[in-house]
Image (cartoon, helix red, strand yellow):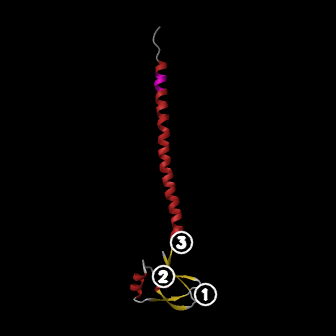
Amino acid sequence: MRLTYICSSCKKQNYLSQKADDRAILQKQLSSDEIQVNCNSCGKMEKKHLNKIVAVVDNRLVFLGIPLGIIATVILISFFGLIATITFSIPIYVWSYEQKKAHQFNLFRIRK
Ligand SMILES: [Zn+2]
């Protein structure tokens, strides 16, 4: 989450460096109902009422989450891949065991 405001002069969205979970915390941090802001686009200095400060999703964290999601997916797939390997290896193991038993049976011939 990032705190933003819209510049009253150029209507561009600016990000605040302050971090707060709600406006009351921000108010306590600033010990004021207003915050002094400086637009990054047009350089306009103004005071914004805290109710004009809007929180938005921090896309940097979202983009950071993408590789983490991919890693988690890869881990999950390889985990379930391992289960699939075990599942398929059991019948193969049983088959090779049966094959060996049958082979041993067929090897031994009684005397006529
Ligand atoms: Zn501006």
| Vertical arrangement, residue 46 with respect to residue 89, above or below | below
Dot 2 crowding, Cα within 10 Å, few <14, some 14–19, many 20+: few
Tags 2 and 1 touching, CB below 8 Å: no
* Label at residue 91: none
Where is residue 43 shown, x and y percent of the image? 57, 90
Residue 112 point in image, percent of width and height: 47, 7
Determine whether the residue tagged by mark 1 lies in a helix, strand or loop.
Answer: loop
User: Which of the pair 96/61 is nearer the observer?
Assistant: 61
Q: Is residue 40 magenta?
A: no
Give the residue drawn at x 48%, y 40%: 87
**Marks 3 and 1, how far apart in space?**
23 Å
Whether residue 103 is in magenta: the answer is yes
Q: Specify whether tag 1 is near ligand 1 (CB below 8 Å).
A: yes
Q: Earlier in the sequence, mark 2 or mark 3?
A: 2
Q: Which mark is residue 59?
A: 3
List the residue tagged with mark 2.
17
**Where are the magenta residues, as a range?**
100-104
Percent position of residue 47, x then y:
50, 91
* Residue type highlighted by circle 1: Cys
How far apart are the two marked residues, 2 and 3, measured between alpha carbons?
15 Å
